[in-house]
């Protein structure tokens, strides 16, 4: 087994987004982070070049996911404390904790099928997305993603690939 890493700072795997941690005293207010995403993959070397996985393939997949979150308000649509009250092609309205009302342009938000937008939840979400998008996983043992809220604090999630 061998491991390869992408360091998000140096490989430019980043996105800037706004979020709120529902119910949290200070982080419950909409605020932003410049997120940095680190990726680690463990697997057997294989193929013509003896790669664990082609860096370029992994970077492209991760960059696409970062791009989908960049310059958006991240809305955890599966939160038990969030209720969507109106939605059409242009607008979304939702209430948080039965008292905070939001109305935002659809183009400014990304509705995520997760319960919260903590670094913990985002690392799980991004890991699952990367695993889904890698076509050839036969020789891989796990993918681990660390989502850093700026430099110095982050959460990581490791998903083992079932064979
Ligand atoms: Zn935050």
Image: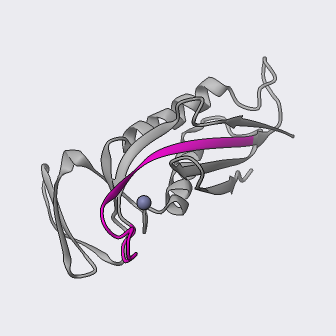
Residue 117 to residue 61: above or below? below
**Which residue is drawn at the image coordinates 20% and 80% (left, top)?**
99
Q: Quadrant of the N terminus?
A: top right
Where residue 104 appears, as percent x and y from the top left, is: 17, 56
Tally of marks: 0
Q: Quadrant of residue 84?
A: bottom left
| Color scheme of the displayed model | one colour
**Which residue is drawn at the image coordinates 71% and 31% (left, top)?**
53
Where residue 85 appears, as percent x and y from the top left, is: 16, 71
Q: Nearer the viewer, residue 1 or 95?
A: 95
Instruction: Confirm whether the magenta stretch covers residue 37.
Output: yes
Q: Nearer the viewer, residue 119 or 86?
A: 119
Instruction: Confirm whether the magenta stretch covers residue 36.
Output: yes
Residue 94 horizontal side relative to residue 152, left or right:
left
Where residue 123 appears, as percent x and y from the top left, is: 55, 54
**Which residue is drawn at the image coordinates 66% and 27% (left, top)?**
55
Residue 76 to residue 151: above or below? below
Write the start and end of the magenta stretch as one range: 21-41
Check the image and name the residue furthest to the right. Answer: 1
Residue 109 horizontal side relative to residue 56, left or right:
left
Where residue 150 appears, as percent x and y from the top left, is: 51, 48
């Amino acid at each position: 087994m061998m491991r390869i890493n992408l360091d998000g700072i140096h490989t430019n795997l980043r996105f800037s987004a706004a979020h709120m941690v529902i119910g949290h005293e200070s982080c419950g207010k909409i605020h932003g982070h410049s997120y940095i995403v680190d990726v680690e993959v463990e697997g057997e070397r294989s193929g013509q070049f003896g790669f664990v996985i082609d860096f370029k393939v992994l970077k492209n997949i991760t960059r696409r996911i970062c791009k989908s979150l960049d310059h958006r308000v991240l809305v955890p649509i599966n939160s038990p404390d969030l209720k969507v009250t109106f939605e059409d092609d242009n607008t979304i309205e939702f209430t948080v904790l039965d008292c905070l009302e939001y109305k935002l342009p659809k183009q400014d938000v990304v509705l995520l099928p997760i319960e919260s937008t903590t670094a913990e939840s985002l690392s799980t979400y991004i890991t699952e997305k990367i695993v889904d998008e890698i076509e050839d996983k036969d020789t891989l043992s796990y993918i681990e993603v660390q989502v850093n809220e700026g430099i110095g604090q982050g959460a990581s999630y490791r998903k083992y690939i079932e064979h």
